[in-house]
Image (tube, rainbow, N blue to C red):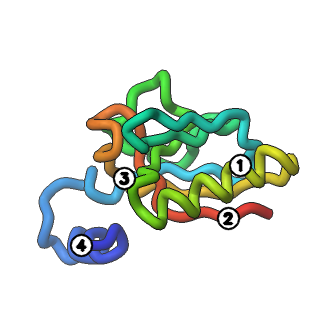
């Protein structure tokens, strides 16, 4: 179920927890680091912490990061976007999903984003 559908259902009173819609975002941020692990999971780290309402599952150490999975086509696209932005210095706007599934409850998952 997509993030937006979950939020719509929450607003309609289907879910009882408001945490289902908590998601962070960063606007016009610089990519300061890109991490890729041997299992294909990775992080994009920004020059500042995520704003709005970051996922409650994310720990403070990763307050400036979003996670992705290179085992998916979306993860490969995120890596390409992050590396291009890091190399060019172009700012990135990115939104989290409000979940921490990629790294098992420590880093918010990447939902969508763009280089500017």
Work out how far the residue at label 1 is from the one at label 2, CA to CA, in angstroms.
Answer: 12 Å
- The answer to whether mark 1 and mark 4 are in CB contact below 8 A is no
Residue 10 image point, x, y percent: 22, 68
Residue 110, compared with residue 14, is above or below; it is: above
Drawn side of residue 106 relative to residue 36, left or right: left
Circle 2 residue: 114
| Separation of residues labelled 4 and 2 (CA atoms) | 23 Å
Name the foreground residue: 6 vs 112: 112
Categorize mark 1 by other alpha carbons within 10 Å: few (<14), some (14-19), many (20+).
some
Q: Nearer the viewer, mark 1 or mark 3?
A: 1
If you read the primary sequence from the N terminus, does the residue marked by circle 3 or circle 4 appear first? 4
Tell me the CA gap for discs 1 and 4: 29 Å
Mark 4: secondary structure: loop
Q: Is residue 3 left or right of residue 1?
A: right
> What distance separates the C-alpha of mark 3 from that of mark 4?
13 Å
Closer mark to the observer between disc 3 and disc 4:
4
- Residue at 31% x, 72% y: name it: 2
Badge 1 element? helix
Q: Earlier in the sequence, mark 4 or mark 2?
A: 4
Helix, strand or loop at mark 2: strand
* First of labels 1, 3 by sequence position: 1
The CA distance from mark 2 to mark 3 is 18 Å
Question: Which residue in the structure is indicated by mark 4?
Answer: 1
Q: Which mark is first along the chain, 2 or 1?
A: 1
């Amino acid at each position: 179920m997509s993030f937006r559908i979950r939020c719509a259902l929450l607003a309609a009173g289907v879910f009882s927890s408001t945490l289902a819609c908590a998601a962070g975002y960063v606007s016009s941020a610089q990519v300061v680091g890109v991490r890729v692990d041997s299992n294909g999971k990775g992080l994009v780290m920004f020059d500042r912490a995520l704003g709005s309402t970051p996922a409650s599952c994310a720990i403070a150490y990763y307050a400036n990061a979003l996670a992705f999975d290179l085992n998916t086509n979306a993860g490969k696209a995120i890596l390409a976007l992050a590396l291009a932005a890091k190399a060019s210095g172009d700012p990135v706007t990115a939104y989290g999903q409000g979940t921490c599934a990629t790294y098992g409850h420590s880093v918010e998952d990447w939902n969508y984003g763009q280089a500017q």
